[in-house]
Amino acid sequence: MDEKIFAEIGLTNAETKIYLALLKTGMTTAGPLLTETGLQNSTLHKTLHKLVSKGFASFTIKGKTHYYRASDPDNLLKFIKEKEAKFEYMLPELKVMQKPVEKQEAEVFEGFKGFKNMCYEFIKNGKKGDEYLFFSFFTKNPNDFENVYTFYKEFEKERRKLGLVVKGIAPKNIKDKFKGRNIKNIKFVDFPVPLNISIFRDKVIMTPWEDKQISFLIHSKQIADSFRNYFYSIYR
């Protein structure tokens, strides 16, 4: 495999080694990665943190132990369009290397790239007619706010392509942010509602960004049904 493409999209040699090792091992702790990559312990942990920050990996915590997994190679193509031709040539080989990972109850994504990866992971395998419900995104940081709403315009194209039925609830004071967006089924309210939450099938995403860009993807039918019922108690 020609690994130079990873350098072209911004990964260091250590990041490339760990990302490919994560693809082969699936969900794993740091221990097996030390054996697979031959990196020093301090370098491994520092590099894992960078991969999570860049959106190339995510982690789940069980007890006090971190379990890491690589982002799906398909998602990388969303953010490196200028390298798509080279990466697409490598994609089949990467997919063969990737060990299937059983979904965990919750996954953590860091940074803006991690957030975007999470959004595409959220609707992966969506089918025409599936409902996508949301309580609108909001954060006091104006740069984060604008970046997310700019991304949503691109993300909406993917939802339309899949034929998803999108419905939302948002505060009236941010109604202007929805101008020019192709969302017909939205209810604007003048009373407090939860924010930064979306529901799709048996999954929920939460993006509480006031202190840090940390996003959560939760796999739970019970939690999804609970938020879905609350959504429809308002959306009438």
Image (spheres, rainbow, N blue to C red):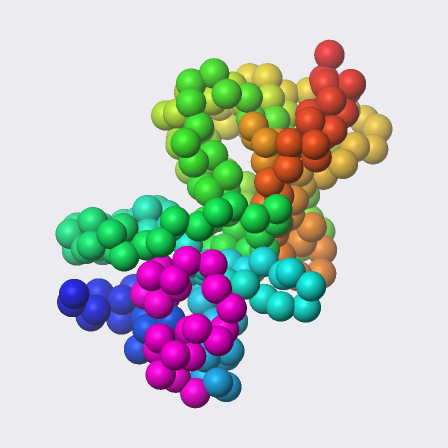
Give the residue displayed 39% in from the left and 79% down from the top: 35
Q: Residues in magenta?
A: 19-40
94 relative to 43, above or below: above
Residue 235 placed where, x, y %? 72, 17
Q: Residue at x 27, y 71 (%)?
A: 7
Quadrant (top left/top right/bottom left/bottom right) for the C terminus: top right
Name the chief secondary structure element in magenta.
helix
Q: Residue at (42%, 22%) from the top-left corner?
A: 127
Q: Tell me if residue 160 can be seen.
A: no
| Above or below 144: residue 44 | below
Residue 42 lies, in percent from the top left, at 50, 86
Tell me if I can see residue 16 in this picture.
yes
Instruction: Answer with left or right where residue 6 lies relative to residue 155.
Output: left
Seen as rendered, the residue at the extreme right is 191
On the image, which quarter does residue 111 sit in? bottom right
Left or right: residue 175 versus residue 68 is right
**137 in relation to 178, above or below:** below
Q: Position of residue 118 (x, y in %)?
A: 50, 47
Magenta stretch contains residue 146? no
Is 20 included in the stretch rendered in magenta? Answer: yes
- Residue sitting at x 32%, y 54%: 98
Quadrant containing the N terminus in the rendered view? bottom left
Q: Nearer the viewer, residue 146 or 49?
A: 49
The spot of residue 67 in percent (x, y) is 54, 63
Left or right of 205: which side holds 17?
left
Horizontal side of residue 62 vs 100, given as left or right: right
Q: Residue furthest top?
A: 236
